Image (cartoon, rainbow, N blue to C red):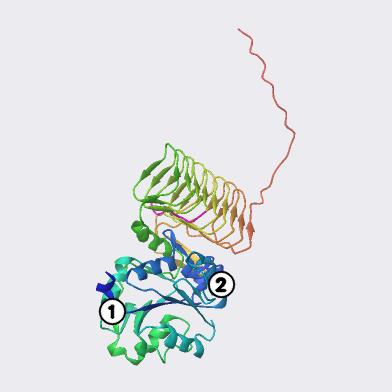
Amino acid sequence: MAQEIMEEKEIKLVIFVSQKNREQLFPLSENNPPALFQVAGKKIIDWIYKHAKKIGVEEIAIIATKIDTARFREALNDYLLPNEPTNKIGPFHFFELNSKNGLSREISANLIEGFLSEESLWVEGNVVFSKKFFENFMRKTQGTEKLALIKEGKEEDNSAKEFMGIAYFAKKYLDSNLLGATCVADIYQRVSTKIASFFNAMPYEIGKTEFWKIDYLWNLLDANQVLITTIKEKNHGTIEDGVTIIGKVSIEKGTRIRSGSYLEGPLSIGKDCDIGPNCYLRSGVSLDKNIRIGNACEIKNTIVYAGTHIGHLSYVGDSIIGAKCNFGAGTITGNLRLDKDTVKAQIGKDVISTGRRKIGVIMGDNVNTAINTYFMPGIIVGNNSAIGTGVILNRNLESGKFVYVDQPTITQDWKVKTKGKKKDK
């Protein structure tokens, strides 16, 4: 397959970890760049590498700020080989980006002279795609020397064509266009402006092209629903008697599925998780490692990050739950409006449509909920926050905040009435 697609050409891949639109990806973007977000049991960067490796890509450049580079080094530790230089982990090479000034002259020269092949693939750090899309895109690159995925704007508002975040360039078009770039879109604009009539474009079709640009966090759920159908079925965990498994389910080492649990694939469960007893995991569930799902919980089409505990008698649907959260018993996420209309969410000062009929809560890292807490559809909760007993959260919660109900209480004397024996009549 690799030879068929690439005609045996050497190709390098570049992941440009842009700083743009991070505020739209709150709260997960506070602790991680988008390329480290979870989708269908893997980080986005793992998905990109998995697909690229199958067509013969052996080396990947990561262009990121100093802070993001440190986060990548920690996240990619499993790829580490003995005696590697500080700027490399396995197939990944790191190039530092100044978020304000873009690529420096030195880094641009290092890329051109020391890393890039004659033709290279460039992707933004906030995109993820299926194997089907990637192979189709790479076939279309043959003989083009330049190709980009483009979404057509609407004719009625005269909007310009939108670059979707993946492009293929011959080195000769990059030499003078890297300096100062802060994302792949900058490079695309420069190249396409100079050679517009010769630039090749692949059209993006909503709902058909298996490619997702993560502009908002709910886009992760769209990608998750498709990519999770491609996982390999496996069971490396401990399955107790009385567990029912239907469909394609992936269970990693160290995970225990307790009796009475019902798993309906496709779904992915990471390492060292503890599920049940009597849990219902429905299709689309993606659990990272070290996750505890307590007795009698129902989880549906939801991404859960590492170290989170979801307490017994809870329901979580169509949601994204960050790392190291802890849910008190009876925590419920609402995911459907009463009128069944499209759910809206507040991003900054703007209220926008999610485009989804069902969406629950989007939650950051280290969030605690008390018993019997409730979330209305489309609510966003910041990192390091807490929600008290009996709260119905109907608006976004900032990071580092505690919201609780201050209810009035009345105390009075109380006498226990003793029940005497009834006399026979």
Range drawn in magenta: 283-289
Q: CA distance from mark 1 to mark 2?
A: 33 Å
Residue occupied by mark 2: 70
Task: Tell me where residue 282 appears, x and y as whole percent.
Answer: 40, 49
Asked which secondary structure carries label 1, the reply is loop
- Which sits in the foreground, 14 or 384? 14
Residue 46 relative to residue 30: left or right: left
Residue 204 relative to residue 69: left or right: left
Q: Is residue 123 one of those drawn in magenta? A: no
- Within 10 angstroms of label 1, few (less than 14), some, or many (20 or more) residues? many
Which residue lies most toward the front here? 83
Amino acid identity at mark 2: Ala
- Within 10 angstroms of label 2, few (less than 14), some, or many (20 or more) residues? few
> In this rendering, is residue 304 above or below 177?
above
Q: Residue at x 43, y 83 (%)?
A: 115
Task: Tell me where residue 160 appears, x and y as whole percent.
Answer: 35, 82
**Count of marks overlaid on the render:** 2
